[in-house]
Image (cartoon, coloured by chain):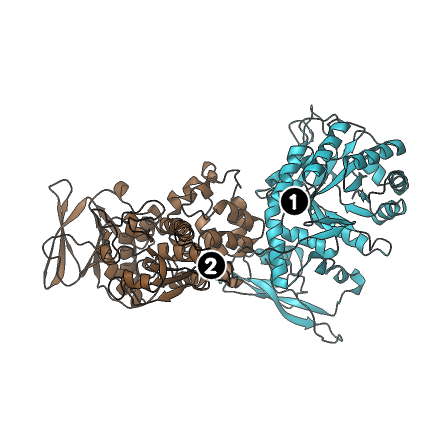
Amino acid sequence: MAVKKDLSINYLGVNCENPFFLSSSPVGGCYDMVKKAYEAGWGGVFFKTVGIFVADECSPRFDQTNKEGLPWLGFKNMEQISDKPTEKNFEFMYRLKRDYPDKVLVATIMGSSDDEWKQLAKMCDQAGADLIEGNFSCPQMTSHAMGSDVGSTPELVKQYCKAVTSVTKTPFIAKMTPNVTNMILPARAAIEGGAAGISAINTIKSITNIDFENMTAMPVVDGKSSISGYSGAAVRPVALRFAAQMLQDEILKNVPISGIGGIETWKDALEFLVLGCRNVQVTTAIMQYGYRIVEDMISGVSHFMDERGYDKVDDFIGKALGNIIPAEELNRDYKVLPNFDHKKCIGCGRCYISCYDAAHQAIDWDEKKRRPNLNDECVGCHLCLNVCPVQGCITSGEIKWKEGRKPAEIALKHNFE
Amino acid sequence: MSKVVKAKYTADAVAGFTPRTAMEEAARCLLCVDAPCSKGCPAGTDPGKFIRSIRFRNVKGAAETIRENNVLGGCCARVCPYDRLCEEACSRCGIDRPIEIGKLQRFAIEQEKAFKMKTLTAPAKKKSAKAACVGSGPASLACAAKLAQVGYQVTIFEAAEKAGGVLTYGITPARLPQHVVDFDIKAVKDLGVKFVFDTKVGVDITIDELKQAGFKAIFIGAGLWNAKIPEIPGNGLKGVTNAIDFLKAARESKGTFDPGKKVVVIGGGDVAMDCATTAKLLGAENVMIYYRRTLEEAPANMNEIQYATSLGVTITTNFAPKEMIGNKKVEFAVFKGRDGVSEAKVAADTVVFAIGQAPEDLTKIAPVKVTEKGTISANASGKTNAAGIYAAGDAVNGGKTVVEAVAAGKEAAAEIIVYLEKKEGVK
């Protein structure tokens, strides 16, 4: 029988059947969508952001980046918060909580003044939301009193968190914008203002492609375009970095963080969890593939737990965080030479080209045999391993200790996908 | 000059995927809303779901989907006629070419083995009733697995010394390596299914004895083991053989069997292609297939025809066998043309008839009603005229694919469960 594990986790006092959530976005904007998502297996949703402001949207509003035939490497979105009437959204949420009491419902809100934030928070409580999230991070709002312009100003974040937490006891989560150099400052401000959790990251301000037909960016709206939020697989590394930095911060380290950014697979989700996030949120992959992707997240993480002998999600949360250290603390006493398996090698020479043009000219090319040979110039950078198209052909080989450094046991990576 | 494939008898005809190439192929999948590939699989293997699992890096989940739906997922990955089932249904055909579903299935099952996964389980507490399966081919194995998974005690009775039936004795190992067959059978054994070898039901043990021994339901998946050889002059000469004996001899000799330099195979189905490739891989220099109809009418899978011709096998159509000539040992095979005027006389060291197989006398196994062709009369869920006796697979359908036998074996198991619960009061 299929491996089944207990994936439940407590998040801000709420029991979640699994750590997989929809993020506040187009994928969770009405009753029927969320109902389908719940039934597909998602543990909970962050409902599409509701404001007093009702969005007036442009058309079209999406674009995507790709590379060598692979679509949706990154995704651009110009949609703002909900374009449905405020009351209608809360009615959806009320019905969802009534019909799916065991699923987690987070109401995400965005105000443009203390009063609006308070008003919205009260409506969340009336609708019966388990948690409230404050959107301080949408980068494409048509009002500068909302969205990432607020989120990049710690004082405003703190002020609005205070406004919300002054009228509700429901735990409040502040959603951060990555359009800052240091996320710790707005995140600390949110906690000071009474927020109990942090979500990160919202989308990155971007121009994805230039359209030469209209000489503007994509998507083209009446011959013009705007800078707006970038998401998808391409932003995951940025999201992981922000999550790790906050989780390693003295003040934020015990604050539950919800990880967002480019998650498509169970492995992507697991990356956020082993850094210390207590759950993850997904949008772009759902826009591309649908709610069904949660099936393989549940199954994949269950198999991981089965393989490693974990009984609950809490057993591996944060396992990798301690191994992310400052660059100055890395062991720099040795180099790992690449090992070339000439039998697996197909003779494309990509390692030779990259090593010569971008590294240390450490590979000699045997023109007759069409095979690479390492020379003494190798510094162990492994650019060759990263360009090799054949799995398991270039691997970690001999370890060379720098002169005067003491050899010791070291941990290496052996399996590359 | 044409480049003819040179291969060893026991070497894999096609290389498998690595995790990286499997991912590249899975990424080509369009992940269709209604997965026509899944609808195209008779056994319900659900490629739409397992390809999605590979795409989302959950290869263990992919293996689970395959194994749970099709206990012979490893074998089917090798021998299924994809080009007329799931791959033909693939929406990607509208862009370029279908997803290589068979190869992805093979990859997932190889990973199941590499990870030492134990996908199928049987309850520790067994049900009171025992069931018997006659034969250990695809239909019986599928039926036995389904019954064992819900707690029935199942015993398979096999006339040969090794399990697998047609999988073990009837297909060339280049297409279906024995380790792949053995790994699938291990999944059945691990469910607690017992195997009794060298025991032919109806000869070594009777159906009544099985009933007395407490078997409350009996499934017959005896296959087709009577080779057809036409009544033509010279059909008894040495060197004239049939597909069953020829493939079995090759398989048992592990590739050391010598068919001579010139081999003529007669027939137009997958078995004929298997005989021809086997002869070629065993070292025959000149292997010729003769078929009485056209290629369009031939039942063989196009992939198998292409594989045979890639090895240098020739196919001559519209010629039917007329007589075999030789002094004790065959020397020539003579064919008459479909046009009524042409004739061909071909020198041969071995002539293999691969023109279809018939059942042995199945009424010897049990008092079941049989058709004119000798196959068992059973409905779609395997029910025969005799109470408690079920049948499916080639012995019922007259010889179809492995995946159809698996599907029918599963169906019969479901019917047997209903029977045992209702009639025998098994809980």
Viewer-nearest of discs 1 and 2? 2
Between residue A268 and residue A163, name the one nearer to us. A163
Tell me which chain the residue with mark 2 is part of. B
Residue carrying label 2: B151
Left or right of residue A61: residue A153: right
How packed is label 2: few (under 14 Cα within 10 Å), some, or many (20 or more)? many
> Distance of mark 1 from mark 2, alpha carbons?
33 Å
Q: Front-most of B251 and B174?
A: B251
Asked if both marks, 1 and 2, belong to the same chain, the answer given is no
Q: State the image quarter where residue B247 is shown.
A: bottom left
Direction from residue B427 to residue A322 in the image, left or right? right
Q: Which chain is brown?
A: B
Query: Can the viewer see residue A315 in this picture?
Result: yes
Q: How many C-alpha atoms fall within 10 Å of the one at disc 1: few (<14), some, or many (≥20)?
A: many
At label 1, the amino acid type is Trp
Please, which chain is the residue tagged with disc 1 on?
Answer: A
Q: Position of residue A276 (x, y in %)?
A: 75, 55
Dot 2 amino acid type: Gly
Give how far across and how far down residue A87 sits, in percent: 77, 28
Chain A appears in which tint?
cyan
Spot occupied by residue A351 in the image (x, y as percentages of width and height): 59, 58
Q: Which of the pair A152/B111 is nearer the observer?
A: B111
Q: Which mark is residue A42?
A: 1
Asked if the residue at tag 2 contacts the one at tag 1, i.e. Cβ–Cβ closer than 8 Å, the answer is: no
Q: Is residue A403 left or right of residue B85?
A: right
